[in-house]
Image (cartoon, helix red, strand yellow):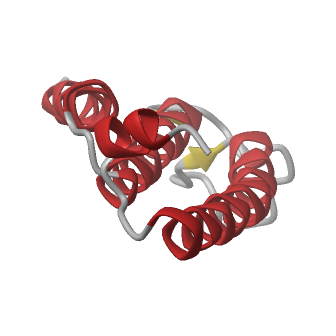
């Protein structure tokens, strides 16, 4: 249960970074933290205590079961998240080249 709580804390830290910070780089880092918290939660949900493996061989009576579907989803999520983060970093670099700052309040004031 404490692992789920720590995942929730990690998620809340990411949401705080997205909502409270005004720097684009800090917002991107907050998004990465949220993504990792969700991935960790899905991995934790995939573990089943006392479950049986779908294929048992002789001598494999005490095997712990881990559902492979969340692991496959996490691999897909990591690849998609990497693409999204790369796009956000590229957009942030272009914004910095145009405005000379990562601060959202200054970018809103420049309007051009």
Q: Residue at x 51, y 29 (%)?
A: 45
Q: Residue at x 31, y 27 (%)?
A: 15
Q: Which of the image's four quarters has the N terminus? A: top left
Picture coordinates of residue 4 (x, y %)? 27, 27
**In terms of depth relative to the viewer, which is nearer, 30 or 102?**
102
Q: Left or right: where does residue 17 sit relative to residue 84?
A: left
Picture coordinates of residue 95 (x, y %)? 57, 62
Q: Quadrant of residue 56?
A: bottom right
**In terms of depth relative to the viewer, which is nearer, 19 or 98?**
98
Q: Is residue 75 above or below residue 18?
A: below
Picture coordinates of residue 24 (x, y %)? 39, 52
Q: Quadrant of residue 110?
A: top left
**In terms of depth relative to the viewer, which is nearer, 52 or 42?**
42
**In terms of depth relative to the viewer, which is nearer, 112 or 65?**
112
Q: Which of the image's four quarters has the C terminus? A: top right
Picture coordinates of residue 5 (x, y %)? 18, 25
Q: Left or right: where does residue 17 sit relative to residue 79?
A: left
Q: Is residue 95 above or below residue 37?
A: below
Q: Residue at x 53, y 45 (%)?
A: 39
């Amino acid at each position: 249960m404490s692992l789920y709580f720590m995942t929730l804390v990690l998620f809340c830290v990411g949401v705080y970074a997205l909502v409270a910070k005004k720097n684009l780089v800090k917002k991107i880092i907050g998004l990465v933290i949220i993504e990792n918290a969700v991935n960790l939660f899905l991995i934790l949900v995939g573990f089943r205590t006392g479950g049986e493996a779908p294929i048992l061989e002789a001598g494999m009576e005490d095997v712990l079961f881990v559902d492979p579907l969340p692991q496959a989803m996490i691999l897909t999520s990591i690849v998609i998240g990497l693409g999204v983060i790369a796009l956000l970093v590229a957009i942030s670099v272009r914004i910095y080249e145009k405005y000379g700052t990562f601060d959202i309040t200054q970018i809103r004031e420049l309007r051009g």
